[in-house]
Amino acid sequence: MATGSVEKRARVAPAAEPATVLECRDLNVHFDTPDGRIAAVNGISFDLKRGRCLGIVGESGSGKSQTFLGILGLLASNGHAVGSVKLHGEEILNVPRRRLDAIRGEKLAIVFQDSITGLTPHKRIGEQLSEVLTEHRGLGRTAARAKVLEMLELVRIPEAEKRFRMYPHEFSGGMRQRVMVAQALLCQPDVLIADEPTTALDVTVQAQILKLFKGLADHTNTALVMITHDLGVVAGLCDEVMVMYAGRVVEHAAVDELFYAPRHPYTRGLLACMPRADRDSEALTAIPGQPPDLAALPAGCAFAPRCPYAFERCEAERPTLSLAAPGHARACHLEALP
Ligand SMILES: Nc1ncnc2c1ncn2[C@@H]1O[C@H](COP(=O)(O)OP(=O)(O)OP(=O)(O)O)[C@@H](O)[C@H]1O
Ligand code: SF4
Ligand SMILES: [Mg+2]
């Protein structure tokens, strides 16, 4: 009987890993400023898989946005990205502007926190959304209009026909954000990057929009990157998560692993700050101290000045990201958290 069950198990093929869409290797982003060089992103590597959602968390200034702005060729003029980023095997880091514009329209879309900056104020919503399809997909005006109306309905914009003719300022914040989601998904991108897409909105609207995101991304098998301060968002939406500190990934694991068995002191600190229904808010503990100056990163672990477990080696030697368990990487000199 035991043998039978082993045979049965052996016959069950393991679930196929979804295909890798985007492969980022050793990405660095720095900014040259009058006060020196700022190392905003330092040696980041990850894969994005079709239909999966990767969460990126970390305090303000930890390099979350610059990582993806670097990938998309959208850094400020004093910024430089170095490394390798492949989309379906094609190198896209620092390729000429025209090629990047085409890729951004068709394969990689980003939704920012502030929907007003993503929309052109003097153009009607319908017109700007239709352009996405006429310019990038070669659709005629009538076909584009029909598709835009369909998408507006999908993101639950009421009275889509009427809204089609309205200007961005005539929409509420929540509705503008839905329009941004619709715009990003119109070309059915392979990768959708959402950079704090709901921070400016009230909590109920946030939840609706995040659900919408996930539902639409699942529906179209898009790889989703969710950049957020909010670990609650990660828990609800993401499959895996990368925790960033001072421009580096300090922990990378499946969401359940990271929540139930964090292996980096910083992640544990973030989890302790997270509001939970079973804990009163006074029990919340912000991590004491400040992140380091990115213009003068220490030789050792950047988290050492704030780490309750720091020991001699931490000041002298920077921990590298290595596997602590299958699929669970962390950058810390401790074998295990005390
Ligand atoms: N043009 C620039 N010149 C110099 N430094 C810059 C420039 N743009 C960004 N930075 C620095 O890069 C670092 C990383 O910024 P980034 O925007 O990625 O942070 P973030 O993790 O997205 O933070 P937040 O959660 O506040 O959005 C910050 O310290 C920021 O000050
Ligand atoms: S390497 Fe040392 S200082 Fe850094 S997180 Fe681990 S224990 Fe703390
Ligand atoms: Mg940011």
Image (cartoon, rainbow, N blue to C red):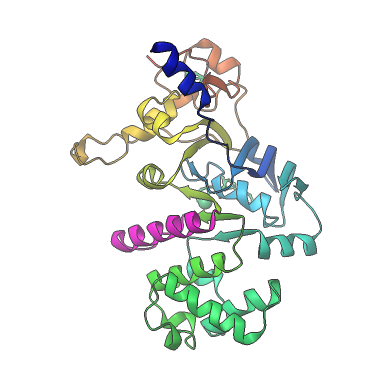
**Nearer-the-camera pick, 135 or 294:** 135
Residue ranking furthest to the right: 96
Q: Residue at x 44, y 70 (%)?
A: 154
Quarter of the picture containing the C terminus is top left
Vertical arrangement, residue 103 with respect to residue 43, above or below: below
* Residue 288 visible in the picture: no
Q: Residue 24, image x and y in percent? A: 67, 40
**Which range of residues does the magenta coloring cover?**
195-221
Magenta-span inclusion, residue 5: no
Q: Is residue 135 visible?
A: yes
Above-or-below relation of 104 to 120: above
Q: Nearer the viewer, residue 23 or 29?
A: 23
Q: Is residue 6 left or right of residue 273?
A: right
Q: Is residue 181 left or right of residue 32?
A: left
User: Residue 319 vs residue 204: left or right?
Assistant: right
* Quadrant assignment, res 175: bottom left
Vertical comparison of 147 with 291: above or below? below
Where residue 331 appears, x then y in whole percent? 54, 23
Quadrant of the rendered structure where residue 72 is?
bottom right
Left or right relative to 238: residue 88? right
